[in-house]
Amino acid sequence: MIYDLVIIGSGPAGLSAGLYAARARINTLIIEKDSAGGQIATTDEVANYPGSIENATGPSLVQRMVDQAESFGAKMVSDTIESVDFSDKVKLVKGQKEEYKAKSVVIATGAVPRPIGCPGEKELVGRGVSYCATCDGAFFEDLEVFVMGGGDTAVEEAMYLTKFAKKVTIIHRRDELRAAKSIQEKAFKNDKIEFIWDSAITELKGDGLLESIKIKNLKTGEEREIFADEDDGTFGVFPFIGYLPATKLFDGIIDIEGGYIKTDEDMKTNVEGVFAAGDVRVKSLRQVVTATADGAIAAIQAEKYIEDNFN
Amino acid sequence: MIELTKDNFEEEVLNAEGTVLVDFWSPSCEPCKALMPRIHELEEKYSDKMKFASLDITKARRVAIGQKVLGLPVITIYKNGERVDSVVGDEATSKSVGELIERHC
């Protein structure tokens, strides 16, 4: 069987593409890795998606997107894609479970949190280092937490973590935040949040659990070590310093710039019939609202491409 | 799947003979919940090779921290009460958990 459209990824971009494609009555398959939603599924509060209801959470928003796409006939399967072959007119998407054939493909694989890249980090993931506040916040009830970063995500997640932690310290490499002003205002008012400016984490240490971090002042070069409170024995570090696009599968197959997939404004990549949408592509604003817009455009362009090339 | 609590963790895991798989999770951990049905599938396949158990960390936070678990998801293999292997965080997928189980059959 050949699908009209196979969508790789089931975050907002993929689900929106699925919705638009299914409504256009083209035979659509959305492939999700282990779960639908992408990064937004681990976001506690989505306050900036137009029309999102009060107290909308990432998971609830995603669930509504899934239901909506499926209600119009988009099919979803769970599989991990291991390779793709875009060299023929009919594209091959090879999963761990099955091989999928498609007339067109939308790549909506998104991005994952960028690690700090300092010594000790990898060893301490799940042992005090976490990239998901909603997943792991509850561990840090009455413990101390350090958040690295200064953008929207870093500051919002820091505020979320104050629900659990006794103190949250934001470590940022500049002397002012990059987050939206409305978010900053809330953070400065929160008396559980403290700041360490002009600094970055350079090392994480601990035997079994995270016990200390080394922080370097980027202006003075001065380095110091912060140890966990002796009674606590441990604390948390949550880096929110940007993302790494999930484009490894497409290396050498489609045009990539700085890790992200290059598209035109119709979401077309350099390969005919292959489109990219959402955080995975080169763009200036990576938000749910821009991801869903990308998905809609990609689906409509895919429909057009199929009409022009297969009928 | 055995539901672990702070009361039975010692008996079912630390004092248990043989191999036990423990799925550390919490209701607010979406990746954990997404992984759960896959682990049930694996349980059906491997239930004669090891015991499958899960611990909701929100009900037993100290037990989890005692096991050096301070982030989710974590799927861990215990052999005769010793933590011998695990997959953690982003690396915990249906594939990697399958491989983890295979290593300890």
Image: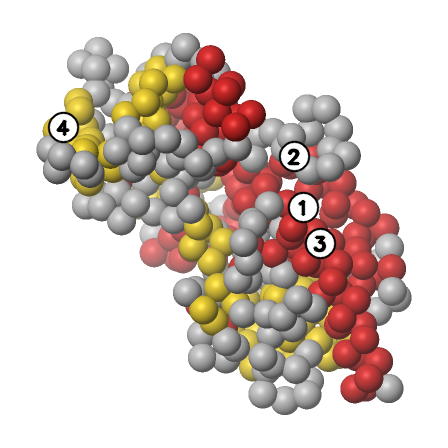
The crowd level at tag 2 (other Cα within 10 Å; few <14, some 14-19, many 20+) is few
Quadrant housing the N terminus of chain A: bottom right
Q: Are marks 3 and 1 on the same chain?
A: yes
Residue placed under numbered mark 1 in the picture: A289
Q: Give the mark toward the camera: 4 or 3.
A: 3
Depth-wise, is mark 2 or mark 4 nearer the camera? 2
- State how far apart marks 3 and 2 are (Cα): 14 Å
Q: CA distance from mark 4 to mark 1?
A: 40 Å
Residue under numbered circle 4: A225
Same chain, labels 4 and 3: yes
Residue A67 circle label: none
Residue A287: percent from the left, percent from the top? 60, 45
Image vertical order of residue A238 relative to residue A88, above or below:
above
> Which amino acid type is shown beneath numbered disc 3?
Ala
- The residue at which mark 3 appears reads as A293
The reply to whether the C-beta atoms of the residues labelled 3 and 1 are less than 8 Å apart is yes
Could you give the CA–CA distance between mark 3 and mark 1, rounded to whole angstroms? 6 Å
